[in-house]
Image (cartoon, rainbow, N blue to C red):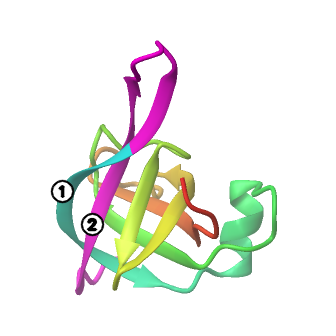
Amino acid sequence: MKQPRLNRRVVLQIRTSTTDALGQQEADWQTLCEVWAEVKAPRGTALIAAQAETSRADYTVTIRSRKEVAPLQTRVVIDGITYEAVHIAEPVGTRGIWQQMLVREVRHAS
């Protein structure tokens, strides 16, 4: 894999849970950090390799590896629009250095 072109600032959010007054678990999103990323439209082969439930992802986001990042537990905010990470992988030959996320726009409030 060639060196990603980290040219966009994105915000990473992670899912957290709290307990309300009635003892019920509530999911919430907490901002983890702001990072540099390469954001681009995904290729069809990336979607097939990810075995995505749907054949749609809005972007492929490449960031420096972070252990807190997990599929469906991570969101990425790009230019004020929130996307959920539906698949996360390390590109071949970059173990522990880069992570690529297939993200799709969050279309509902949660």
In the rendered structure, which segment of residues is drawn in magenta?
A: 2-28
Nearest the viewer among 92 and 11 is 11
Q: In this view, does 35 lie above or below 41?
A: above
Q: Mark 2 points at which residue?
A: 11
Does residue 25 appear left or right of residue 107 in this picture? left
Q: Is mark 1 on a helix, strand or loop?
A: strand
Q: Residue at x 43, y 71 (%)?
A: 61
Q: Residue 83: where, in percent of width, then height?
A: 50, 68
Which residue type carries mark 1?
A: Cys
Q: Residue at x 49, y 22 (%)?
A: 25
Nearest the viewer among 59 and 43 is 59
Q: Is residue 38 visible?
A: yes
Residue contact between numbered discs 1 and 2, judged by CB atoms under 8 Å: yes
Specify the quadrant of the image occupied by residue 11: bottom left
Q: Name the residue under label 1.
A: 33
Specify the quadrant of the image occupied by residue 51: bottom right
Which residue type carries mark 2?
A: Val
Q: Distance between the residues labelled 1 and 2?
A: 6 Å
Q: Mark 1 or mark 2: which comes first in sequence?
A: 2
Q: How crowded is mark 1: few (under 14 residues within 10 Å), some or many (20 or more)?
A: few
Q: Residue 41: where, in percent of width, then height?
A: 56, 86
Q: What is the quadrant of the N terminus in the image?
A: bottom left
Q: Is mark 2 on a helix, strand or loop?
A: strand
Q: Residue 80: where, in percent of width, then height?
A: 35, 81
